[in-house]
Amino acid sequence: MEFGGERPLFARHDIELDNVTIHAGESALKRCSNVVARHCRFEGKYPFWHVDGFKVENCLFTPGARAALWYSTDLEMKDTLVEAPKMFREMRGLSLENVRIPDAQETLWHCSDVRLRNVEVKNADYLFMHSSDIDIDTYRQEGNYSFQYCRNVVIRNADIHSKDAFWGTENVTVYDSSLDGEYLGWHSRGLRLVRCRIAGTQPLCYCKDLVMEDCTFADDADLAFEDSDVEATILSPVTSIKNPRTGHIRVVSAGEVIRDENILAPADCVIEFTGK
């Protein structure tokens, strides 16, 4: 079947869509609940707003289906291509598996209870703004300013290319991942990195309770740890370390350690060179 225009399926409950096309229009499934959509094509704006409980499998959201899923709860999405921008706002209870989002700018804002498995996002500037309780595994991201002001996040097996990632976050743990981008983790609280590779200038500055376990640094990851409270074990050389505030850094070697008049009290960070 095919639908278009304004609110063609408004306030429907307990419905199943199979091989349905939603043409140009607005709010096709607004105020619905218990919806299943399989092998569907969404072309119109705002198809799922204020929806309570829905499954989306093997579907396509074209660029015209912008802002498709907002103000909704309990979504399961699998094997789906999302070409539409500005997806997932003000939502609770999202599970995405085998999902690709090639235009993920301003996506996943103010969401909670989020689970991602085998998800790839591109053009993902300002992804995950002010979201919480996030669980991610097997993930690839290209896009800047991601995860700003997020809380309670666990990420595993990720390849994240993002300038200004994890700014102002609280209680974030990242395992076995590559983090490539300038100004990583500034102003974060409780950031923990385990077996991660860090690339990009001036990483991990102005952090509180920063923990790093068995991480490595690329050559361009210079001027690290300024004004940070840090406990770190680094299994590679670091190009330069600048004015860490306090804590203990165990590192193979450092090309330069800068302690100048701008260092903040207590200015007692111990840097231990392991040589291996």
Image (cartoon, helix red, strand yellow):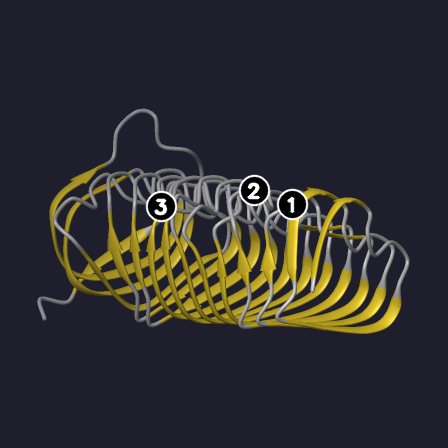
Q: Which residue is mark 1?
A: 44
> Where is residue 227 shown, x and y percent of the image?
40, 38
Q: Is residue 240 left or right of residue 160?
A: left
Assign a secondary structure to mark 2.
Answer: loop
Whichever of callouts 1 and 3 sits on the residue coming sooner in the sequence is: 1
Crowding at mark 3 (Cα within 10 Å: few <14, some 14-19, many 20+): many
Q: Measure the alpha-carbon separation of dots 2 and 1.
A: 6 Å
Q: Secondary structure at mark 1?
A: loop
Q: Residues within 10 Å of mark 2 (few under 14, many from 20)?
A: some
**Does the residue at mark 2 contact the one at mark 3 (Cβ under 8 Å)?**
no
Q: CA distance from mark 1 to mark 3?
A: 31 Å
Q: Position of residue 151 (x, y in %)?
A: 62, 55
How much space separates mark 2 and mark 3, taking CA atoms? 26 Å
Task: Give the quadrant of the N terminus.
Answer: bottom right
The circle drawn on residue 162 is 3
Element type where label 3 sits in the image: loop
For the residue carrying disc 1, how many other residues have a C-alpha within 10 Å: few (<14), some (14-19), or many (20+)? many
Q: Mark 2 or 3 closer to N-term?
A: 2
Instruction: Using the image as rendered, state which of residue 86 and residue 26 is in the foreground.
Output: 26
Q: Would residue 55 appear left or right of 14 to someone viewing this image?
A: left
User: What amino acid is labelled 1 in the image?
Assistant: Gly
Query: What number is the disc on residue 64?
Result: 2
Q: Position of residue 75 (x, y in %)?
A: 70, 68
Depth check, front residue: 125 or 5 = 5
Residue drawn at point x = 26 percent, y = 55 percent: 198
